[in-house]
Amino acid sequence: MPVPSTSPTDPSHAPRAGARQWLALAVLVLAGLILSLDFTGLYLALPALGADLGASGTQSLWILDVYGFLLAGFLVTMGAVGDRVGRRRLLLAGAAAFAAASLAAAFATSPGMLIAARALLGVAGATFVPSAMAMIGALFADPRQRALAFALWMAGFQAGMALGPVVGGLLLSAFWWGSVFLPGLPVMALLLVLGPRILPEPPRGEKHDAPVDAQSAAMSLAAVLLAVYGLKELAHRGFGPLPAATLAGGAAVGVLFVRRQARLTHPLLDLGLFRLPSVGPALVAFAVPGVIGGGAYLLTNVHLQDVAGLGPRDAGLCLVPGAAAMVAGSLAAPHLARRFAPHRVIAAGFAAVAAGYLILTTVDAGGGVPVLIASGVVCGLGVGPATGLLPNLVVGAAPPERAGSAAALMQTMAEVCIAAGVAVLGTLGGAVYRDRLSAALPDGVPAHAASSAGEGLTQAGAAAADLPPGLADAVLAAARGAFVDGFRVVAAVSAVTAALLAVLASRRLGR
């Protein structure tokens, strides 16, 4: 299956990119790395900033989550805005806002100020992702070069996610907590200086003068925020009235949003993108791995810290080999796709992901760090081809004037699926944990301690600290065994899901 091209001529005769285009890509990749670094770089700084600013538990959660909430919530809107006003103009405005918000976050003097700065960072980040991906499609007309360019973009994004805790730990060992927000400043300055000279302005199409429908933008934001918030509440508290009502509200607003787009002459989201060949299956194949990846990432972190007993920094280092393997898989994918059909490369990758999760089903309560690292490497190598090839397939198949909207839709679906994975698979693992723990707790455990231990492995450790040594050891052993049982069930479900994705990629993307 040939890789789609945005060039109006024969792809085999498309002009090849030169040094200027590759320099532009390097700047975009570096900025994307910084953008993803902000997702994970704050975790290690949270205790220090919480103590310094006097942040409550709720405020600390909002400091962590508001960035991802608003980035996901504004992606569709910013994709449409970029398609209308110009992607380069929007990206440079977002870079300036990101730099200003980073400074405000670094020197925040109150929890409210830090939450507001993180919110602005999320909005600024939402301007960047669809614009950058549309520009990559415009920079590289040659299909092979464009495939490699998208693979490098995704590799940079993945590297930022993995390096966040490592970079944060290094900065915190030498500077104050606000230093974790400063790496983005020189990168955004570089983007602002070089961007006007080396970044292209992709075509905007006939509708670029059409106004952005404010009601659609509000509905898009509300639907995504309600969905992501409801899924996070489901993951943190289990099923109850609040997550149920929030998820139902998000679904209702989402349905109304889709119906409105179908009626508008110039919709915020062009539903015709789903009718383009391969785009629908490619969107599913790109987003759904976030479900199993989000759930496994959550449980892996818990296992490394609460079962294996590693600190946050060491736990983060154990995740680096898997992230490096994902980067390697992304970069290798375009080369493999030249020899084999892209859909076969993607399908083989998902089969490897299934094998990686089967490895994870062998984890035990004795630590299991080598198993976790091996599973992460195999899964990373397997998911790399999907992350490396599918963005090119989606953005390249869309008309150039709709490339920003296509990229925004793809990234929004991925963000929601990651939150869904944390919620659904986290809830599944928690249900198995509680069931196994209730049968494994020794006699003589006080009711309040048993109730606390049932809330999770971390809570079990806190409850055991107040018990006599022998009983405490027994409670911890039971809790760790129950957690591992739940982890194995989640790994098995993830393996089956990855196998189904391999079938989808083989049958549907091949068309």
Image (spheres, helix red, strand yellow):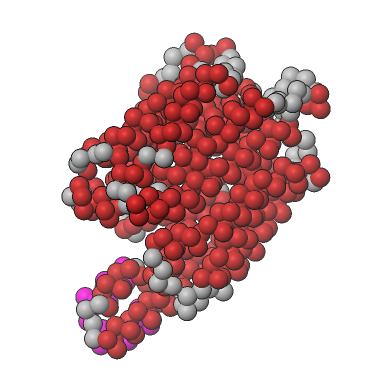
Q: Is residue 470 above or below residue 318?
A: below
In the rendered structure, does residue 451 fall within the stretch colored magenta? yes
Judged left or right of residue 494, residue 173 is left
Question: From where the camera sits, is residue 46 visible?
Answer: yes
On whether residue 1 falls in the magenta region, the answer is: no
Range of residues picked out in magenta? 437-455
Residue 171 vs 366, above or below: the answer is above
Q: Position of residue 464 (x, y in %)?
A: 27, 78
Residue 199, picture quadrant: top right
Depth check: give the residue in front, 233 or 98.
98
Query: Image quadrant for the N terminus?
Result: top right
**Which quadrant of the view contains residue 307?**
bottom left
**In the image, what residue occupies the spot 43% across and 50% down?**
167
Image position, residue 7 (x, y; %): 72, 22
Residue most toward the left? 54
Which residue sits at x=40%, y=53%? Answer: 170
Q: Position of residue 83 (x, y in %)?
A: 52, 20
> In front: 241, or 350?
350
Q: Please report the residue visible at 39 percent of the width from the left and 54 percent of the height from the top.
A: 169
Establish if 358 lies above or below 179. Answer: below
The residue lying toward the viewer, choosing from 129 and 321, is 321
Which quadrant would the C terminus be assigned to in this image? top right
Q: Residue 403's spot in the image, x, y percent?
A: 59, 26
Q: In the drawing, does residue 102 fall left or right of residue 384? A: left
Q: Is residue 326 above or below residue 28?
A: below
Is residue 439 among the parts visible in the rendering? no
Residue at 70 percent across and 46 percent down: it is: 333
